[in-house]
Image (tube, rainbow, N blue to C red):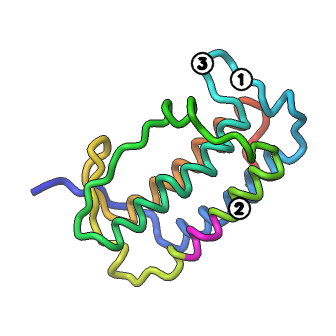
Amino acid sequence: MTNILQSSTDVATLLDTLARTPDRLAALVGTLDEGALNAAPDGEWSARTVLAHIRDDEFLVMRVRLARTLAEEHPVLTPFDERAWADARWRDRDGLAQLIEDIRLQREASVAIVRRLPPAAWHRVATQPEIGTFTLQWWVEHWVEHDVNHLEQIAALLGRAVPD
């Protein structure tokens, strides 16, 4: 039998953390000037690129995987090529206020779906070749970890602490 990745974090904590991420991002970057927003060591993403990644990843990856796991029986999910995304990404809504507004809008849509899941949905299973097989609850926990990693990444770029 396949080893299925499962979450040990309760659903309420996961939902609360997902819902708070846009506010935490806004508190972290809300006062940045263009120079700070674009600064990055060689080979690293700037805070602007990380914010755009969070926005785009929300609707291109996270919510699509959520929807497929809910709609399909044991879907096999396609890996996401972050390097290709970074090279070809859409840059027309990259102003700081637009990025935060778009992240907030996308996250509100995601959280609205996740809040309505019946208990049985949390045990649905999907596979992603780079990760393995996992429950939907594990996927949402991974989503939270993704947020935390990028909050820490931006904070490190800016020399700031991650807001609560």
- Whole-percent x and y of residue 32? 87, 38
Q: Amino acid at mark 3?
A: Gly
In the drawing, what numbered circle is on residue 104?
2
Q: Is residue 53 left or right of residue 60?
A: right
Q: Is residue 123 left or right of residue 66?
A: left
Residue 77 on the magenta span: no
CB contact under 8 Å: marks 3 and 2: no
Distance between the alpha carbons at the discs numbered 1 and 2: 24 Å
Image: magenta residue range: 107-112
Residues at circles 1 and 2 in contact by the CB criterion of under 8 Å: no
Q: Residues within 10 Å of mark 1 (few under 14, many from 20)?
A: some
Mark 1 / mark 2, whichever is N-terminal: 1
The residue nearer to you, when weighing 51 against 21, is 51
Q: Secondary structure at mark 3?
A: loop
Q: Label 1 vs label 3: CA separation?
A: 8 Å
Q: Give the residue drawn at x 83%, y 51%.
A: 97
Cα distance, mark 3 to mark 2? 28 Å
Dot 3 or dot 2, earlier in sequence: 3
State the residue lying farthest toward the top.
Answer: 42
Q: In which quadrant of the rendered image does the N terminus lie?
A: bottom left
Q: Secondary structure at mark 1?
A: loop
Q: Amino acid at mark 2?
A: Arg
What residue lies at 30% left-to-right and 58% top-to-bottom? 134
Callout 2: few (<14), some (14-19), or many (20+) C-alpha neighbours within 10 Å? many
Q: Is residue 134 left or right of residue 43?
A: left
Residue 43's tag is 3
Q: Which mark is residue 40?
A: 1
Between 49 and 32, the one nearer to me in the picture: 49
